[in-house]
Image: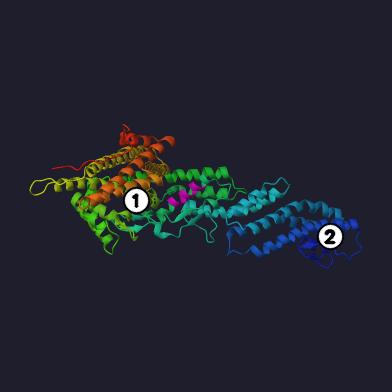
């Protein structure tokens, strides 16, 4: 009978120990066994049932290499964890053959300690089968299960984790040292971004414009195992992304490998960590920090010295932040009429023609060539005024696209859109004054009756817009530019440079109200209404007076909203600065009006 029992304990049922509903039991028709023996054997068969279930899971999934690496590693690890149980059966068989008088108590003594281990493994596989975690998240399930105080369970699950960690280290090695994503079944926490069109334009040494492939990866924090912190995951992502940009853009030969002679050293260190039974988080974190420092130092030198980030930022600011005011003054003058209509077939070509003409009129030949290579005006296709959907396509010099990313260009375009609207409104009010002065005299020298309200509204709107522009350009942009440039001088870390630039864009966007929909809408409405007033003033005085009343209402509402926000927002120094410029003696807010009706001017 012992022979049949040992076979059953290996997961093979028979006539004496049949299987029903996945459970092995002593055949009830056998009467030769004492009830106590039946109880002991059934206890042993519970262990056999768990082993049979695990063996079934392993045979079904262990060699499914075409579906998931982590799942295959999981079952490989479970099979390894079952080896002590199988070895115990081999030893028992040897002892039973050697000693004919072996008792059931011997089997019970040797096999019952394996029961909690096999039970824990069965429960683990059931949880994974029910939850179906993706790739790396299988590690989380095993880590949680390994935190058990039951003797033997932790040791067995460490063997499972060891197999899973081999897969993780294989992926980490490819990413950290080669910038290569080894993930055939989409299980890693770094994924390839399929939106290739979102990659940024880069300008080569000879002026050619190509799309960089280095921005085609994303970090999925929801796939990061819990024993790897989000901060550590960000470092891992940064290292691989930085290394692969050289590979994808084929700059290794000209710029040198990022890790250079340290690659062999790092490979040996990572191999040593991989061969450990447990994933040593502290050691791995220190290892990642060493690689990050090497990569960051190399990229800092490349970005600040070789690529001259400051010069590139100056060009970006000249374009997106209207740093070259005379250039955009000329562009607005040339394109105002053509872009004040909905898009047509030739609208984008007209915009770029006006841009190139502006470059020729304002810039030197060298600056003009550089701007033509880097900057292109792009129009949307929505049925609204072209000015409202004008944006800039900018080709960044390699490898500065790691700093001036597609997301950064998008933020710059939002800032550019608002600044351009302010500049157009300011130019329009100046043009209105010139127009009114020119039309204020007839050929015979007699004056024309103009509404005093229009004159006063133009004056006060010019005051408001001039002070808003001054606040944006001086108090916000110049202040934050100086702060950013100071940080660039002080740091030797590439990551600090990137974070400082991102913070610059966040601060600027916040302080010019791009993050405040109510103020932004009201400000844009005020600026657009000013443009409408300028167009109407030359031919329809009655409608212009109605627009003056609307402008008066919008301007007061803007002041009230800014004042209300100043009282509610903590640390709103920028709001106080703007209000000081707009309403420094509280004249407008106290009188509750910007303009008041006046009698027509007489000749």
Task: Nearest to the eye among marks 1 and 2: give it.
Answer: 1
| Mark 1, other Cα within 10 Å: few <14 / some 14–19 / many ≥20 | many
The residue under label 2 is 97
Judge left or right: residue 492 versus residue 165. left
| Mark 2, other Cα within 10 Å: few <14 / some 14–19 / many ≥20 | few
Is residue 381 in the magenta section? no
How far across and down, in percent of the image, does residue 341 sit? 27, 58
What's the CA distance linking mark 1 and mark 2?
84 Å
Q: Residue at x 56, y 47 (%)?
A: 228
Image quadrant assignment for residue 460: top left
How far across and down, in percent of the image, does residue 412 sit? 35, 49
The N terminus is located in which quarter?
Answer: bottom right
Q: Residue at x 23, y 56 (%)?
A: 337
Judge left or right: residue 464 versus residue 82. left
Q: Residue furthest bottom?
A: 15
CB atoms of marks 1 and 2 within 8 Å: no
Segment tinted magenta in the rendering: 233-242
Residue 114 vertical position relative to residue 483 in the rendered view, above or below: below
Q: Residue at x 61, y 51 (%)?
A: 140
**Residue 392 visible here:** no
How far across and down, in percent of the image, does residue 276 sit? 60, 48
Q: Secondary structure at mark 2?
A: helix
The residue under label 1 is 413
The C terminus is located in which quarter?
Answer: top left
* Secondary structure mostly taken by the magenta-highlighted segment of the chain: helix
Is residue 241 in the magenta section? yes
How far across and down, in percent of the image, does residue 303 sit? 36, 46
How are the colours assigned in the image?
Answer: rainbow
**Residue 86 visible here:** yes
Q: Secondary structure at mark 1?
A: helix
Camera-side residue: 543 or 257?
Answer: 543
């Amino acid at each position: 009978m012992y022979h049949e029992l040992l076979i059953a304990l290996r997961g093979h049922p028979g006539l004496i120990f049949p299987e029903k509903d996945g459970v092995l039991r002593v055949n009830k028709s056998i009467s030769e066994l004492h009830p106590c023996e039946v109880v002991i054997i059934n206890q042993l068969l519970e262990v056999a049932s768990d082993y049979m279930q695990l063996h079934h899971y392993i045979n079904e999934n262990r060699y499914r290499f075409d579906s998931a690496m982590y799942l295959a590693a999981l079952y490989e690890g479970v099979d390894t964890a079952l080896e002590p149980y199988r070895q115990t059966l081999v030893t028992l068989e040897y002892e039973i053959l050697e000693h004919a008088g072996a008792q059931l108590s011997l089997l019970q003594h040797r096999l019952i300690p394996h029961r909690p281990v096999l039970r824990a493994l069965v429960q683990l596989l059931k949880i994974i089968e029910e939850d179906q975690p993706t790739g790396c998240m299988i590690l989380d399930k095993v880590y949680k299960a390994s935190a058990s105080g039951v003797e033997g369970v932790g040791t067995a699950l460490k063997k499972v984790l060891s197999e899973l960690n081999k897969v993780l280290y294989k992926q980490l090695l490819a990413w950290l040292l080669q910038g290569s994503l080894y993930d055939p079944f989409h299980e890693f926490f770094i994924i390839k971004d399929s939106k290739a069109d979102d990659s940024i334009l880069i300008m080569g040494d000879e002026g050619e414009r190509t799309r960089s492939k280095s921005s085609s990866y994303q970090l999925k924090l929801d796939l990061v195992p819990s024993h790897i912190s989000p901060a550590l995951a960000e470092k891992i992502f940064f290292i691989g992304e930085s290394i692969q940009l050289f590979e994808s853009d084929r700059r290794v030969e000209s710029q040198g490998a990022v890790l250079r002679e340290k690659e062999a050293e790092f490979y040996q260190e990572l191999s040593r960590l991989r061969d450990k039974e447990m994933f040593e988080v502290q050691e791995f974190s220190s290892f990642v920090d060493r690689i990050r420092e090497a990569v960051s130092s190399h990229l800092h030198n490349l970005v600040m010295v070789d690529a001259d980030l400051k010069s590139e930022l100056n060009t970006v600011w000249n374009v997106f932040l209207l740093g070259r005011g005379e250039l955009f003054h000329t562009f607005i003058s040339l394109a105002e009429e053509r872009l004040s209509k909905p898009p047509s077939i030739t609208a984008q070509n007209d915009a770029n023609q006006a841009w190139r003409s502006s470059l020729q009129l304002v810039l030197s030949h060298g600056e003009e060539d550089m701007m033509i290579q880097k900057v292109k005006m792009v129009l949307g296709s929505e049925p609204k005024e072209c000015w409202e959907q004008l944006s800039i396509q900018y080709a960044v010099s390699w490898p500065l696209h790691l700093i001036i990313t597609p997301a950064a260009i998008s933020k710059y375009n939002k800032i550019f859109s608002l600044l351009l609207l302010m500049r157009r409104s300011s130019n329009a009010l100046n043009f209105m004054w010139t127009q009114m002065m020119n039309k204020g005299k007839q050929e015979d020298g007699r004056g024309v009756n103009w509404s005093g309200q229009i004159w006063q509204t133009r004056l006060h709107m010019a005051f408001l817009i001039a002070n808003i522009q001054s606040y944006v350009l001086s108090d916000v942009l110049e202040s934050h530019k100086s702060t950013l440039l100071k940080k660039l001088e002080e740091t030797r870390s590439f990551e600090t440079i990137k974070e400082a630039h991102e913070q610059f864009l966040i601060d600027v966007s916040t302080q010019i109200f791009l993050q405040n929909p109510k103020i932004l809408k009201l400000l844009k409405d005020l600026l657009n209404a000013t443009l409408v007033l300028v167009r109407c003033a030359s031919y329809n005085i009655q409608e212009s007076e109605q627009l003056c009343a609307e402008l008066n209402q919008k301007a007061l509402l803007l002041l009230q909203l800014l004042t209300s926000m100043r009282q509610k927002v903590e640390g709103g120094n920028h709001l106080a600065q703007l209000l000081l410029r707009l309403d420094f003696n509280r004249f407008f807010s106290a009188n509750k009006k910007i303009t008041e009706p006046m009698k027509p001017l007489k000749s």
